[in-house]
Amino acid sequence: MDPIPGLKALQARKRDLLLESEVNRQLFRLELTKLQLSVDRLRRGFTSGSNLWKLLVPLTGFFMGRRFSRNSRLMTKGSVIVSLLGAAWKVWNAFKRTQPAEVPER
C-alpha cells in the first residue's frame, strides 16, 4: 500500500523526465559539435580563398545590377550573351575532344 497516493506515478514520471533530459543534453552536445565543425570548415574555406570567389561573384553581380538598374535591358541582353558564349565554349570544347586523332599517312 502506498504511503502517499500517486507517489509511485510521480516517481516514474520524474525518472522519465530525467531520462528525457539526458537525451536532450546529448543531442544538444551533438548539434554543438556539428556547428563547431561547420564553422571550422567555413573558416578554413575562407582562408584558403577558394570559397571567397563563391561569395564575391554573386555580390559583384548584385552591385552591378543595382548600378545599371536604369539600363536593365542592357544587363539582360549582356547576361544572355554571356550565357550563350559559355554554352558555345562548352560545345566547342566537347567537339574538340570527340574528334578522332588524325593518322599520319605512310
Image (tube, rainbow, N blue to C red):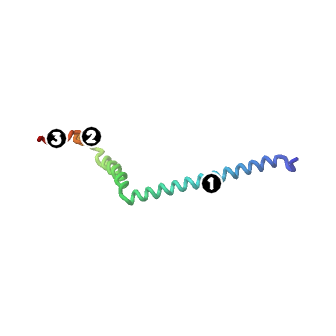
Which mark sits nearer the N-terminus, 2 or 3?
2
Task: Please state which amino acid type lies under the numbered disc 2.
Answer: Ala
Residue beneath the point at 64% across and 51% down? 23
Q: Mark 2 sits on what residue?
A: 87
> Looking at the figure, which quarter contains the C terminus?
top left
Percent position of residue 1, x then y: 88, 47
Above or below residue 70? Residue 52 is below
Task: Depth check: give the residue in front, 53 or 73.
Answer: 53
Residue beneath the point at 37% across and 52% down? 55
Percent position of residue 99, x then y: 21, 39
Q: Secondary structure at mark 2?
A: helix
Q: Which mark is residue 25?
A: 1
Which mark sits nearer the N-terminus, 1 or 3?
1
Q: Secondary structure at mark 1?
A: helix
Q: Marks 1 and 3, how far apart in space?
A: 70 Å
Residue beneath the point at 28% across and 41% down? 83
Q: Using residue 44 as the reference point, say whether residue 68 is left or right of it.
A: left
Q: Residue furthest bottom?
A: 47
Q: Is residue 77 visible?
A: no
Which mark sits nearer the N-terminus, 1 or 2?
1
Q: Marks 2 and 3, how far apart in space?
A: 30 Å
Q: Marks 1 and 2, how far apart in space?
A: 52 Å
Task: Depth check: give the residue in front, 62 or 92.
Answer: 92
Q: Mark 3 sits on what residue?
A: 103
* Camera-side mark, 2 or 3: 3
